[in-house]
Image (cartoon, helix red, strand yellow):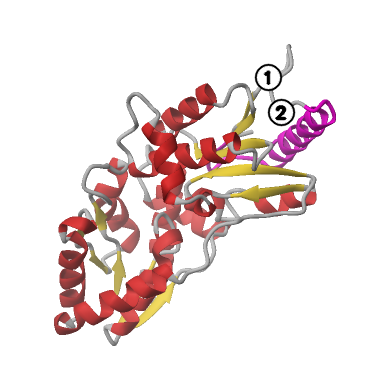
Amino acid sequence: MVIGIPNGLLFRIYGDFARAFITELGVSAVFSPETDRTILDAGVRSCESEACLPVKLFCGHVAWLHDRCDAILVPRLMRLTKRQSICPMFCGLPELARGAARGTRLIDAPVYAPECGGLNAWAKQAASAVGAKGRWNAALKTAMTAHENRKAGFCDSGYEHTVALIGHAYNIYDRFVNMDLIRKLHALGIGVITHESVADADIASRVAALSKPPFWYFAQRYYGAALHLLKSGRVDGIIYVSAFGCGVDAVVEALIRDASGGAAMMTLKLDEHTGAAGFDTRLEAFADMLGRRKANGDHHSPPGEYAYGYAGAV
């Protein structure tokens, strides 16, 4: 038996976990490749038109896998922690992906808060779906170890400028959809630090200072990481990478902007129509702004200069 793992959405974080879990069950795992135009087009064709770009891309990866495996791993993500929610799209992901699967079976067991035993329940159901129910516990332990040992995130040093690069892993690390953003920043002399390089305690302390913290899991992590990196002086500015139309990201962006004290901040909005020319121009303008501020010894907005830039679809 071969199980397909789509290389999108939260598998950008939990891909090592998924591969180790499936392999330990005694079956083969196949990942879809890095995103390309063919995968994007397949996702646009097979997914709901109202879905955001990351969901369309996920459907494109499912479409790539549909005739290369016996079943595809598409968990129904309900809640990652007991008191924090997740985007509703993840709750309905199997329904959104079913058309792209074209009849290939989906392993769509739900995932609830791990601290409430939800991960154990998912592992039992997923293992049962491939005929290996008796091996779920060993497979889960192996997967957890693989996840803990993974190499994640960026913590650059030695660049002329450094920014906090904030956003979902499926936006930051998909080089096709973000047009190789990190490489382009490096070429402009800008290093990046991502939220994985910030300690959980530092994130929690920044979130705790909010009068009403957002109840979404990733929203709290991105807000806390951005504020900690900025206020601790580790970065010269913030770049927030978001999918066009993402309501949760819009809230996080506003919270960061309000708390940043006028620091240099740019939001890059991605959708299937985003063009490289305008994207590159905005990156270059942001790099120039960082240079002027550093020359003036000021990381905040001088009169007449916008602290908040928008780079959307062009």
Residue bearing mark 1 = 306
- Look at label 1 and name its amino acid: Tyr
Residue 261 position within the rendered picture, expressed as x and y whole percent measured from the top left:
59, 22
Q: Disc 1 on helix, strand or loop?
A: loop
Question: On the picture, is 45 further left or further right than 143?
Answer: right
Give the residue at x 51% y 39%.
242
Residue that carries the numbered disc 2 in the rendered image = 299
User: Where on the picture, by quarter, is residue 302?
Assistant: top right
Residue 283 part of the magenta-drawn span? yes
Residue 29 screen position, x and y as percent: 37, 79
At a point 40% along the width and 74% down the height, the residue shown is: 146
Could you tell me which quadrant the C terminus lies in? top right
Tag shown at residue 86 = none
Magenta residues span: 268-297
User: Residue 273's spot in the image, x, y percent?
Assistant: 57, 40
Q: Is residue 98 visible?
A: yes
Residue at 61% from the left image edge and 36% from the top image edge: 238
Q: Find out whether residue 187 is within the magenta segment.
A: no
Q: Residues within 10 Å of mark 2 (few under 14, many from 20)?
A: many
